[in-house]
């Protein structure tokens, strides 16, 4: 079955202003995805890694890309199609709590 990387963006303000019942259902959707074998994690502080022309590893703290909302978490899910993946993540916390979820097909 095809795999998809999902990136959830969201912040505490959006989460807090989402009704509790909707948040609870979203966490149940996360639990369902885990039960189906998804690997889900909350994002920690990022580190950038570079090794230009294999000349030596350079690291720096912080994100490379900038978005309107911070990265909140990641998941690797299996879905029959992109449409199925959309359906699966449309009810997770970032999608329902005023955030957004990107879906990246993995080849």
Image: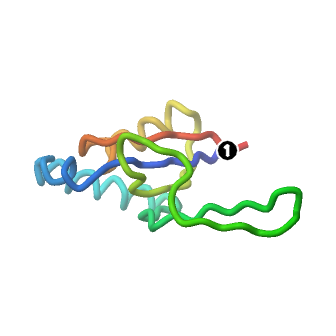
Q: Residue at x 15, y 54 (%)?
A: 16
Of residues 89 and 50, the one drawn nearer to the viewer in this rendering = 50
Query: Left or right of 82: which side holds 66?
Result: left
| Image-quadrant location for residue 73 | bottom left
| Residue ID at (50%, 55%) | 75
Residue named by callout 1: 106
Residue 7, compared with residue 103, is above or below; it is: below
Quadrant in the picture for the C terminus:
top right
Q: 57 and 70: which one is in front? A: 57
Q: Where is residue 9 in the image (x, y as percent from the top left)?
A: 38, 47
- Give me the residue at 41% from left, 43% from top: 89
Q: How many marks?
A: 1
Q: Which of 93 and 85 is in front in this view?
A: 93
Element under disc 1:
strand
Looking at the image, which is closer to me, 13 or 1? 13
Looking at the picture, how far across and down is residue 22, in whole percent? Answer: 18, 48
Q: Looking at the image, which residue is at 44% across and 56% down?
A: 33
* 4 is higher (above) or lower (below) than 45: above
Q: Position of residue 48 (x, y in %)?
A: 62, 61
């Amino acid at each position: 079955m095809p795999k998809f990387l999902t990136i959830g963006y969201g912040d505490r303000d959006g989460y807090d202003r989402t009704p509790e019942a909707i948040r609870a259902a979203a966490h149940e959707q996360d639990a369902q995805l885990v039960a189906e074998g998804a690997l889900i994690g909350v994002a920690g502080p990022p580190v950038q890694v570079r090794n230009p022309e294999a000349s030596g590893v350079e690291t720096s703290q912080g994100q490379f890309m900038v978005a309107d909302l911070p990265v909140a978490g990641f998941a690797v899910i299996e879905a029959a199609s992109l449409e199925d993946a959309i359906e699966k993540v449309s009810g997770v916390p970032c999608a329902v709590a005023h955030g957004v979820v990107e879906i990246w097909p993995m080849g």
